[in-house]
Amino acid sequence: MTQNNHNDNSYDIIVIGAGISGLLSALALSKEGKKVLILEKDSSVGGVCRSYEVDGYRVDTGPHAITRLESGPLRELMDKYFDVVPQFVPFGKYYVRAGNRLEPFPWSLKDWLTFDIIPKKDRLLLMKSLFDMFYMLSMGKDLSTVSIADVLPSEISSTTRRFWDYLSYFMLGTSMKSAPVSRFIDNKCHKQDDKLSSIPYAGKIYNLLISEGATDQKYPKGGIQSITNCILSSFPKNRVEIKTNEQVTGLQTSDTNAIKGVSTEENNYNCDTAVYSGFASDLPNLISGLPEDYTRNLMRIKKVNSLTIWLGLTKQFFSNHGSEMWIDSDPYTWAVPTSNYDPGLAPAGKQLVGFATVLPEKYNPAEARKKALDVIIQTSPEIESHIDMVHYQELIPEKAAWSLDSSFGDVKTPIKNLYTVGTDAEKRSMGITRAAYSVLRCLRIMRSEKVL
């Protein structure tokens, strides 16, 4: 794919990677008046923000819920830079499934006290743990160094432990033994300084206690591809060029340690600034002279592996407007009936459902697929005789797991005018929302450094 060809190989900014964070960066920078080149190694753009046809069904690259949409980072970018804005529908409730029981997720303190999937004794014990966290905060404890497992009472049931382990895997990509408490009290406010507050979590627990649930979570009509389509439609004329099937092989720097160009297998391109949206852990393979401590930190980033099984069903098995969290399944499963949000994603009278699981760092693909499909059928045996389509996706939905024993990259790099964006450059939130946070932060830093 190529848009708006230029006659030379010089650009103001080169964006490496055409996933959602790269596309959002290119859109914002081109709207700020920059001449932008996007280089993408694959034949298509969008990364995991992409949809495609399978036997009459339109599947996304993994199930998605767009969080913090009312006033979060993606909304800020859409309001400022999009000419065409996707149409969104409410994502609905999250339901927790344990055995034959299905209950809405307990977003508020009031809901938690009546959440019968977890025994009443456990709920009271967990409330005590919440007050223990208040005490740790008052004593200056850094909750980013404390795991969920550390604060859970030893007396709680296996169901309660699986509930918190499930949340840890699907919010952070790691078990509750490695999941920091700070992630669960992540601040919703995105317009904040990059420097840490002197009281880093005051007010965040307040947000947790008064939460009204997933009211600001939505799903795009037409599938996740509609977000990518709106970005592409919003590129200003003659400002953006996209080159697919072009693998970046190196980044060049000047004598003053500033970025000056990008090399691919086919060409060399000159630029004043580069935005890298690939895996931050791959940067040392593309550029020489990075500080050792910076490289070591990048090598500690752990990717999140996932498997999604898309099933086309001849019967409407999922009637609720929302998704299901299967905390008893092995592997844990998140079921999202996307055709409930947009019936056009499935043939008339049929239902499209994505079943997402988190995979270990090393796994056997065939065994993982069989195990995940078996779990679906064991949980709902009647589904097996109504399967019309099966499609498997092995994905990396988050480029960095948020765990105690791993690391994150950063938007700012040791190379002048080289920035990184994506879900391994920013900790806040998850998925597309986390990617959007990284892009906003990149824009703020560029302004402070007079690039914009």
Image (cartoon, grey):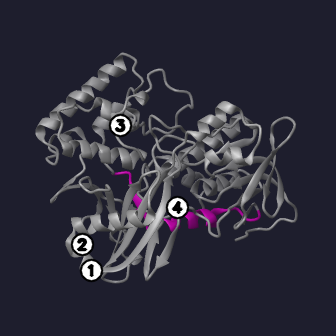
Q: How much space separates mark 3 and mark 2, taking CA atoms?
A: 34 Å
- Asked whether the beta carbons under mark 4 and mark 2 sit within 8 Å of each other, the answer is no
Single out the mark in the foreground, 4 or 3: 3
Judge from the rendering whether residue 214 lies leftward or rightward of residue 285; answer left or right.
left
According to the picture, the residue beneath numbered tag 3 turns out to be 177
Q: How much space separates mark 1 and mark 2, taking CA atoms?
A: 9 Å
According to the picture, the residue beneath numbered tag 4 turns out to be 48
Q: Amino acid at mark 3?
A: Lys
* Residue 107 in sight from this viewpoint: no
Judge from the rendering whether residue 191 lies leftward or rightward of residue 233; answer left or right.
left
Relative height, residue 86 to residue 277 (above, below): below
According to the picture, the residue beneath numbered tag 1 turns out to be 386
Residue segment shown in magenta: 215-238
- Asked whether the beta carbons under mark 1 and mark 2 sit within 8 Å of each other, the answer is yes
Relative height, residue 405 to residue 399 (above, below): above
Q: How much space separates mark 3 and mark 1, taking CA atoms?
A: 38 Å
Q: Earlier in the sequence, mark 3 or mark 1?
A: 3
